[in-house]
Image: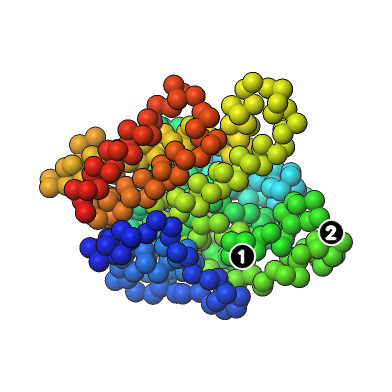
Amino acid sequence: MDRETFHTCCSLVKIPRQSYEQFRSSHFVDYIEKKDFSYSRFFKNYLLPNHPCVFSKRFTEDWNCRKHWVTETGKPNFQRLLQDFEDTPVPVANCNAREYNANPKQILPFKEFISYWREYIQNGHSSPKGCLYLKDWHMHREFPEHNIYSTPVFFSSDWLNEYWDTIEVDDYRFVYMGPKGSWTPFHADVFRSYSWSANVCGRKKWLLYPPGQEEYLRDCHGNLIYDVTAPVLQDKGQYPHYEKACQPLEIIQEAGEIIFVPSGWHHQVYNLEDTISINHNWLNGCNLDIMWQFLQGELSAVQREISEWRDSMDTWHQHCQVIMKSCTGIDYGEFSSFLKIIANNRLSFLNACSGTSAPGCPRHLSDTLATLGPHHAAFDLQRVAHILECMLSNEDFLRLDPTSLSSQPESLLQQIRDAMRSAL
């Protein structure tokens, strides 16, 4: 981040997000062709305003996966993939089955999925087994030595994976492999994170709705539609608000291209050809407020659901946090710990920014922070401080047992304020 962008951001308490009216046209999305496109431009034009864009195949042309996983004709290289992952267990979803608002999954050996895929193609892209889709495979975590791609700098301020890498529990980096016709139902990404998705080979069709439009795509019981192309949406008795919804932003993503999906944009995705893609969910200071708002909404939903027990349970508030974590994967206590890890890494970096590394940070993270620069680290701390202030004035957060919080938010907030005085 350059100095000018940083000083512009210093005055931000609430990040202003532009109207999404321009996206009512299904033909509007910026296409970034040249590799000299700067991070600062991406930050100002897409991250802060929360707008989608597409990067050309030039940004992935050096990836090993595009060289080794794809045949000369642009198809998946099954032979090479089997050499690398033959007996690896992988998660496979059935696109022809519905379980709540998702597709049920099973774990299969990779070679069994490839055998199915080959037969599916030979049978004219059909199978009595249904349309199977290898989804949400943590390939990066399982095979880091393969070095099949590198995260573009535009998506490198990735707090979500930074946190999960630190506690060594999980990550949100995935590989998808699916035949023509495989698809993902209508949804928004975990914690209302950003996502970026790169096609190694094949083509996808994306249908995206700006934040808020999903409210028009709920049935009379408040349930979100499973398939936004389903005729049932025309039934005003079941979907009384559908006529208010805008047309989705439709994007055809070609081989090698990367799509940036902004925070809170609901979407549905189809593989138009046999396709392999790489996807990261990520968040940072630009959409941290959206995550915090999402968590508050999730907790409120839990509280409404079990409100009848509020006066008869001494541990009702703690129980709400437990249910919330089981539903979303995080509660207020872990969110506080998440902020602490992110803040401490940047405090360490700023304390050592005159050198070439940041003591206390893993080497790869230190390199990333150095690439983004001290102004970006200061911006990150500014955003953490703002959310900490919001949390410390939130009644539900203040009801948490202070002894259960390892993050000590008041102390962390003071450290950040001291550091920011020096940075500014």
Please name the residue that numbered disc 1 is placed on.
Answer: 209
Quarter in which the N terminus is drawn: bottom left
Quarter in which the C terminus is drawn: bottom left
Please name the residue that numbered disc 2 is placed on.
Answer: 238
**Residue 141 % position (x, y):** 43, 39
- Quarter occupied by residue 38: bottom left
In the picture, measured across the screen, residue 64 lies left or right of residue 227, that is left
Between 226 and 93, the one lying in front of the other is 226
What residue is at 49 percent from the left and 24 percent from the top?
401
**Residue 229 % position (x, y):** 73, 65
Residue type, label 1: Tyr
What residue is at 33 percent from the left and 60 percent from the top?
11
Ranked by sequence position, the earlier of labels 1 and 2 is: 1
The 10 Å Cα crowd at callout 2, few under 14, some 14 to 19, many 20 or more, is some
Residue type, label 2: Gln
* Relative vertical location of residue 86 with respect to residue 58 in this rendering, above or below: above
Secondary element type, mark 2: loop
